[in-house]
Image (cartoon, helix red, strand yellow):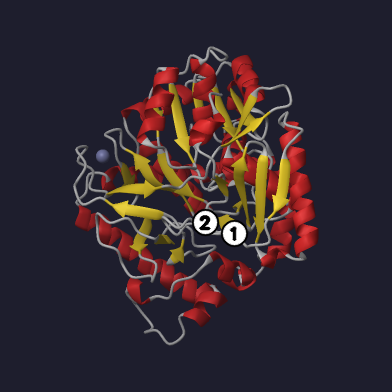
Amino acid sequence: MTRDKESRSMPYTNSGQAGTGGVGHLTALASEAWGFLNHSTDLWLAGLATPDLVRSRATHRLNSLVAHARRNSKFYRDLYRGLPPAHVTLEHLPVVTKSTLMANFDDWVARPDLKLDAVLQFTQDPTRIGRPYLGQYAVWTSSGTTGTPGVFIQDPQALAVYEALFAVRNGTDARSMLRSISGGSRFAYAAAVEGHFSGITMWRRMLLMNPWMAHHTRAISVLQPVVSVSDQLADFDPQILTSYASELVALAEQQREGRLALKLNGIWSGGETLSRRDRADIAGAFGCPVIDDYGASEFLNIAFDCGCGSLHLNRDWVILEPVDREGRPVPDGIASASVLLTNLANFIQPIIRYDLGDSITMLPEPCSCGSPLPAIRVEGRRDDTICLERTDGQLERVIPLALCTAIEERAGVFRFQVLEEAANQLVLRIDPSEGNPNEVAARTEQCIRGYCAELGAQNVFVRTDPAPPQVDPVNGKLRRVWALREPAAAGPV
Ligand SMILES: [Zn+2]
């Protein structure tokens, strides 16, 4: 996401040493070890199955999920009133959106004592990132591509499925990276780490479950200038690195220019679309394999990189329905306008035919790896990196995820758009739903100027355009950070 700081997934590992620290609150985490092993076996077997068998597993899980939602979620019970009592086909179920679900949060969740106010109190405390909520759930927040803040709760079964998917569904390079992390290789995670986002939440959970990993892992905030991120990486000297595609592009530039000399064995890219060119550039600069993935706060591991150049949909645990602008199904081989997601693993907060907003293409040709899981392509899930001229004359790349996180976390504004119209000249557009236009604009402008100053650019001019955020006329998508000037104008960084 941001498009997608939260919705990127990240590699995490369950070494089977859960709870070795003997700390009381780890009991719930340790109890997932059985679920993890159970699901790992199931996933391994599904990888050998036929596409029809995979589909029938998904249908069986969907029927259980819908029945559970009708029984335990008032929101879905009301929404599905009038539908036949059993085994409704997916396409007859109404589509839901994040804004509707969040507006009905207390009725949406499948446990009456889960209340949004209490969950928000939990997510406002940064010391509790990655800690179990009510002794068993993981909680994370997301703004996503729509700009609507979301709060997502994951039950132990969903967490065990996500962890098993990471452990089992991957290519040779990814498997060898996971083995090396479990074996003690230094592992760095450069991301938005200051909030309860899914990536840092799973990272902290991994350390709670495997306290022995703390001394060879490091999480680094990408809200800092690229040079500071580089310095911390150089100091830590990781062998495995995971970050967003745009941050990896900026770090690859540092490596190529000789300002960074990391000796990496592997890189995980997530959260944004990784173009073929960027992948080649990053791999070339660091001289190691680059693994892609596709995930969201709504389902962490939607698709995995098989190592043969494809992302494969985890079709047995997540359903994707590509749709056009009118919500009609889109055939294989055609890029969708959006996609409806159904999470078959998480029953505490059912997500069924949820409008995710991403554009995807189901590829009609099977992949050379022979997987029964369909190959997909994710289109343009990435905003623009802007380039500031710092007060000391140097240029500073600002990745979109960092700028969006600064605005969301510090100004409390979620529905906005920042346009770079010239060097150090930014235009802000804010959705009227954010409140008093003058007050919100002043607060957000000040936040952007302050953040740019932290990055070393004191002389950034920000003005607010009274128009609301505009979609890209080419693809109909909202870009939250949009570089209007030619990328070449930014010059070498
Ligand atoms: Zn493949």
How much space separates mark 1 and mark 2, taking CA atoms? 8 Å
Q: Residue at (51%, 22%) from the top-left corner? A: 253
Q: Position of residue 305 (x, y in %)?
A: 35, 38
SS state under label 2: loop
Q: Residue at (39%, 20%) from the top-left corner? A: 284
Q: Is residue 148 visible?
A: yes
- 337 sits left or right of 199 in the view: left
Amino acid on which disc 1 is placed: Pro
Q: Residue at (59%, 59%) from the top-left corner? A: 469
Q: Quadrant of ligand 1?
A: top left
In front of the other: 347 or 368: 368
Say which mark, if any, is on residue 299.
none
- From this view, report whether residue 157 is shown above or below residue 270: below
In front of the other: 192 or 343: 192
- From this view, report whether residue 211 is shown above or below residue 441: above
Q: Earlier in the sequence, mark 1 or mark 2?
A: 1
Q: Position of residue 372 (x, y in %)?
A: 22, 48
Q: Residue at (58%, 67%) from the top-left corner? A: 99
Q: Quadrant of residue 201?
A: top right
Q: Position of residue 296 (x, y in %)?
A: 49, 50
- From this view, report whether residue 261 is shown above or below residue 315: above
> CB of mark 1 within 8 Å of CB of mark 2?
yes
Residue on which disc 1 sits: 469
Residue on which disc 2 sits: 478
Q: Quadrant of residue 292?
A: top left
User: Which corner quadrant holds the C terminus?
Assistant: top right
- 335 sits left or right of 69 in the view: left
